[in-house]
Amino acid sequence: MSARVLLLGAAGRDFHNFHVALRDDPAIQVVAFTAAQIPGIEARHYPAALAGPRYPAGIPILPEADLEQACRSLDVTEVVLAYSDLSHPDVMHLASRALACGADFRLLGPDRTMVSASRPVLAISAVRTGCGKSQIARWAADRLASRGHRVAVLRHPMPYGDLLRQRVQRFAAPGDLDAAGCTLEEREEYEPHLAAGHVVHVGVDTPAVVAAAAADGDVLLWEGGNNDFPFVRPDRHLVVVDALRPDQVSSHHPGETNVRLADAVVINKVNAAGEADLTRAVDNVRALRPDVPVYLGASEVSLPAGTDLRGLRVMVVEDGPSLTHGGMASGAGYAAATAAGAGEIVDPRPYALGPLRTALERHPHIGAVLPALGYSEAERAALARSIENAGVDAVIAGTPIDLSRVLGRGIPVIRARYDFVPLGTPSLEAWLEAFAGRPGTTR
């Protein structure tokens, strides 16, 4: 008798695990996915064309809130957790809900789910969302390109729209993002790579995406989402720790797994952290991995030259997932606005509309900033109207996307850049140089 499996997910790891480990297993029947974390991705259907011949009707995607009902109505015998950035207690709460329905509870590990590539792979992941993976990935891609490598960026998927269109995607220019109808969250991750001349590959069908990337690059750079471990088997695995959150090295799943898997760890944002926090971050890494190389880095935030915010009322818009999934109160935009002496940083709560208001109520830890939620047209419209309602002089964008596309020309948008700078001796640059020069990574 086949196991009847329900996949707990958030439109990423769940689809990946299904494709590479479960879809073709005759001992398993996946009866449903559930969806969490991302608004509006439940009540969809995983299409038959992706699910394969064993699933001619496709697979339903249900709200995670309906877990118990789904387990009982679908006779679920096993629940598989397949998404990231959950506290360890939250993982066990989900396990308890599954066990109380009589089902087994399982996690699929790296050996079962990592896809092999024909090119060398550098993977960058983290212990939490918002540690600075993206800025480090941009830095690493630029350094590898400066050594003459053709770098193809593989990005953790964000398939929140038409799943068939998002099976395999290749982005080489900003117009490709427009043609694909990318969300703000996708643009946050892809636009900076495109601006630097790096092609981005992403999609639901990881083996096909990896094959397409290998045709583009002689080195593949995996940039993880949230704090997930890589979908692709890395030759070198770099894990990012946030010096401003030193006690979260081992507090969340699967961030702790990443540290235990790491070939090297970089502690980022040390320029903004106190000495005690930095020491605690190093000690917490060493408690798990006494011998792993630990490097230091700064996340330097800047506004365009000549920016003067004195006397101005500004609203700050930050990277959405870093606030919502990552638990951060603010980010680069708030730091930049404060450093530039903004006359007033306007609290968005009185002006937030619709899904923005809901997000701020659901995440009370968020400070006087707006998350750049743009998973749907309704969210993008609410973001624009919420800012317009505040009547501010300018918007400080701590997200790498071009918010002026969303807001139009009425309100000036000043983009805060944040760039990674390796610190100390030996530095992370030396570690990357050793990877860049190893056999198999040269042209």
Image (tube, grey):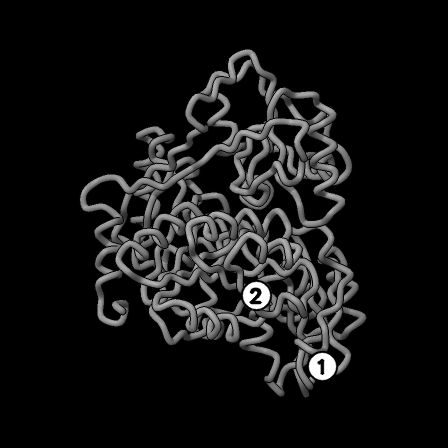
Q: Is residue 187 visible?
A: yes
In the picture as drawn, the residue positioned furthest to the left comes out as: 425
Dividing the picture into quarters, in which one does residue 144 lie? bottom left
Amino acid on which the number 1 mark rests in the picture? Tyr
* Residue 127 x %, y %: 44, 50
Q: Measuring 55% from the left and 40% from the top, which residue is drawn there?
A: 319
Which quadrant is the N terminus positioned in?
bottom right
In the picture of the structure, the residue carrying the numbered disc 1 is 55
The percent coordinates of residue 11 (x first, y second) are 63, 61
Which residue corresponds to the image point at 78% horizontal and 69% vertical from the top-left?
A: 72
Relative side of 68 to 405, left or right: right
User: Is 203 situated above or below 318?
Assistant: below
Element assignment for label 2: strand
Residue under the image location 47 percent in, 26 percent down = 336
Q: Is residue 122 above or below residue 382?
A: below
The number of discs equals 2
Decide which of tag 1 and tag 2 comes sooner along the chain: 1
What's the mark number on residue 209?
none
Q: How many residues crowd mark 2 within 10 Å: few (<14), some (14–19), many (20+)? A: many
Decide which of 340, 236 is in the foreground and name it: 340
Type of amino acid under label 2? Gln
For the residue labelled by badge 1, is the local secondary structure a helix, a strand or a loop?
A: loop
Residue position marked by numbered label 2 in the rendering:
169
Instruction: Give residue 177's position: percent from left, percent from top.
Output: 59, 55
Work out whether residue 101 or residue 51 is closer to the camera in this orientation and state it: 51
Within 10 angstroms of label 1, few (less than 14), some, or many (20 or more) residues? some
Quadrant into which the C terminus falls = bottom left
| C-alpha separation, residue under disc 1 versus residue under disc 2 | 24 Å
Q: Is residue 418 above or below residue 112?
A: above
